[in-house]
Image (cartoon, rainbow, N blue to C red):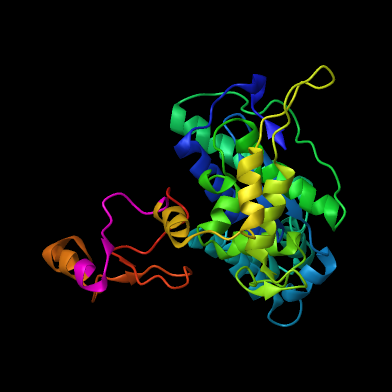
Amino acid sequence: MSRTAGGEMLFWDVEKEAFLRVMRRLERFAGVEILTFAVMSNHFHLLVRVPDRARFLLRFEGPEGEEKLLEHLTLLYSKAYVMALRHELSDLRSKGMNGPAEELLERYRSRFCNLSQFVKELKERFSRWFNKHHGRRGTLWMDRYKSVLVQDGDALRTMAAYIDLNPVRAGLTKDPKDYRWCGYAEAVAGSKRARRGLCRVVDSPLDSWNDKAGASNLTASEWYRCWLFGEGVEVESSAFSSGRKGISTDAAKKVLETGGKLSLSELLRCRVRYFSDGVAIGSRSFVEGVFAERREHFGAKRKNGARKVKEVEGLEMFSLRALRIKAVE
């Protein structure tokens, strides 16, 4: 986790979206896996799995290894940047300078599966965006990030719940699914990457978010929701404790009684929060009608208007634009 300088409240909707955009790009580049997260107004929490580095680097070995490495760099760098790097490598090798060429490539490889480097780059890249966007200078973060090693099992699930419950503890929402800048809300909204992270948390096979598993006969999504509401119950203040904000006992009881199931309307509402402004939603014929009336606003390659609202079982609903998790591009 890391906090802004002085704990100042600097991050609002646009800043949080921008942070997530940078975070996800770096996640793919660095080869780490974010299991869940919470981006708050003055700090962030990340639960990160760091894969075995030697195994990750195997993909860049062999006759085509260098080409795969250069292609991998396009996850973070522009095509022009990678092209310039190709020319630099070619120039070095044409001069018999294979050692410097390898050293150049190692600068990139050394950043893979490296937690310190990942967080350092995340904070630096977001700081540059933030300062440019707000016309400011100077440091954005209070100090170096803080971290703790977490064991698999209950410790991992407890840590994940602590992170996803941050907005509830802060009094921003009564249900973590309604705070779009945490991993659980992103998973409910349909993000495969967020769902895979939480499937790891509950020790369920990847891409099994909506599959029944285990003796409990709950899906991974239902199991984690029950865990969240069990862990998040508020504690009233007393002579021995200052108390703790959280989920009401009645709300927790309701979730546990229903086995963590979300209704169709709740699932749709979580999806709708990520629509672009001005989107049309309804039946296929309704959306196609809106598309025909506003055909000039879409590219020539667009053949039809209706886009199926996916991943909500039993829902026959369409939108004019595909649903997006990232609201800032």
What residue lies at 47% left-to-right and 72% top-to-bottom?
313
286 within the magenta span: yes
Q: Report which quarter residue 250 is drawn in.
A: top right
| Viewer-nearest residue: 30 or 298 | 298
Q: Where is residue 247 in the image (x, y as percent from the top left)?
A: 64, 39
Q: What stretch is highlighted in magenta?
A: 273-287
Q: Is residue 316 visible?
A: yes
Count of labels in the image: 0
Q: Where is residue 276 in the image (x, y as percent from the top left)?
A: 34, 52
Q: Hey, which residue is sitting farthest left in the picture?
A: 293
| Viewer-nearest residue: 184 or 149 | 184
- Give the answer, above or below, for where 188 lies relative to 231: below
289 within the magenta span: no
Residue 314 lies left or right of residue 4; in this view the side is left
- Give the answer, above or below, for where 143 lies relative to 300: above
Residue 69 lies left or right of residue 313; in this view the side is right
What residue lies at 45% left-to-right and 38% top-to-bottom?
14
Q: Report which quarter residue 186 is drawn in.
A: bottom right
Residue 142 lies left or right of residue 176; in this view the side is right
What residue lies at 54% left-to-right and 57% top-to-bottom?
188
